Amino acid sequence: MRYLIEETKTSAGTRGIPLTREVRECLKRIVDNRKTPKVEPIIDGYTGFLFFDKNGMPMVAQHWEQYFKRIHKKYNDTYKVQ
């Protein structure tokens, strides 16, 4: 897999997301408590990623998609939701 960070196709694809104080504190805790990688990954000049996979690389959308599928299945199995 090749990691890259690209600009959005148009300016409409760029989002400014306001963060509440609580969200900023949560993100800071994530960074402060994350396992420090042996080598901090640098991708297209960016560093300081929040979450890493088992190989020490930044987690990508596919990781999250699989996590949410498993969470959804477990919830449905637990509460017998169709």
Image: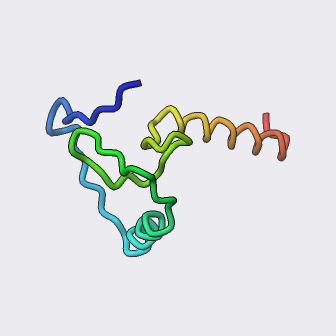
Q: What colour scheme was applied to this rendering of the protein?
A: rainbow
In the displayed structure, would residue 66 be above or below residue 58? above
Q: Is residue 4 left or right of residue 30?
A: left
Q: Position of residue 66 (x, y in %)?
A: 60, 34
Q: Nearer the viewer, residue 70 or 79?
A: 70
Image-quadrant location for residue 7: top left
Q: Is residue 10 left or right of residue 40?
A: left
The quarter holding residue 13 reads top left
Q: Position of residue 54 (x, y in %)?
A: 56, 42
Of residues 82 and 9, the one nearer the viewer is: 9
Judge by depth and name the residue closer to the eye, 54 or 73.
Answer: 54
**Left or right side of 9 for 66:** right
Q: Residue at x 51, y 39 (%)?
A: 55
Identify the residue shown where x is 43% and y is 64%. 31
Quadrant hosting residue 12: top left
What is the quadrant of the C terminus in the image? top right
Question: Is residue 20 positioned above or below 68 on the image?
Answer: below
Q: Quadrant of the N terminus?
A: top left
Furthest-front residue in this view: 38
Residue 74 percent coordinates (x, y): 77, 42
- Which residue is pictured at 46% across the width and 36% down the height? 61
Tell me residue 44's x, y (percent). Answer: 23, 39
Q: Residue furthest left?
A: 11
